[in-house]
Amino acid sequence: MPLWLIYHAPSTFTTPQTKQALAASITEIYLAAGLPAFYVNVLFQPVEPTSFYVGGVARPATGGEDEEKKKKKSHQRPFVRITIQHLARQLPNDTVRDDFLKKVDAVLKPYIADRGYDWEYTVEELRRDLWKVQGMVPPMPGTEAEKEWVALGEAVEFEREKGGLE
């Protein structure tokens, strides 16, 4: 499961349409890699500027900061922080990693960079053996059972050998 946690100022991602469009674009990255769409989770977490500090300054600045810090134009821009967690697949080498990061940058550009926001993201690769869906250990990549999950768009019971778990 890819889990995207998008922490942002309430003044960003203000419409359901914008959130849905970004979530759909993110999901496309993973569909192209053969993952079921339902593996992809995108959570938008608005954070009030008085609870979102970068370098000790609220983002965007709220007026309570040191006047010298507040003068910087960057402090007036919203800051978007994204954490991406991968469980279903890992990035096995530098080439795959670099290709994935380029796709992420391209997906985020119209929603963040082009709007003048400051941003950063990290990708965490977590242990697959500590992950379950609907109480089941998910089938291994490319197996008959995973292909069935992709086709059905949901987790269904499967024989362990068809999921590559034997």
Image: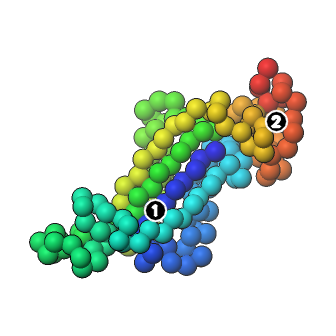
- Displayed quadrant of residue 87: top right
Q: Residue lying furthest top in this view?
A: 166
Q: Nearer the viewer, mark 2 or mark 1?
A: 1
Q: Which residue is identified by label 1?
A: 7
Q: Quadrant of the N terminus?
A: top right
Residue toward you, 131 or 20 = 131
Q: Position of residue 134 (x, y in %)?
A: 78, 45
**Residue at 69% across, 33% down:** 141
Q: Residue lying furthest left in this view?
A: 68
Residue toward you, 42 or 9 = 9
Q: How many marks?
A: 2
How packed mark 2 is, by other alpha carbons closer than 10 Å (few <14, some 14-19, many 20 or more), is many
Mark 2 residue element: helix
Q: CA distance from mark 2 to mark 1?
A: 34 Å
Residue toward you, 49 or 96 = 49
**Which of the two labelled residues, at mark 2 and mark 1, occupies the earlier sequence position?**
1
Q: Is residue 10 above or below residue 40?
A: below
- Displayed quadrant of residue 26: bottom right
Looking at the rendered structure, the kind of residue marked 1 is Tyr
Q: Position of residue 66 (x, y in %)?
A: 16, 72
Q: Would residue 22 be seen by someone viewing this image from the given angle?
A: yes
Looking at the rendered structure, the kind of residue marked 2 is Ala
Q: Which residue is identified by label 2?
A: 145
Q: Position of residue 150 (x, y in %)?
A: 77, 46
Q: Quadrant of the C terminus?
A: top right
Q: Position of residue 80 (x, y in %)?
A: 40, 63
Q: Is residue 78 above or below residue 151?
A: below
**Residue at 77% across, 25% down:** 165
**Residue at 11% across, 72% down:** 68
Q: Would residue 142 be seen by someone viewing this image from the given angle?
A: no
Question: Residue 10 vs residue 1: left or right?
Answer: left
**Residue at 68% across, 44% down:** 35
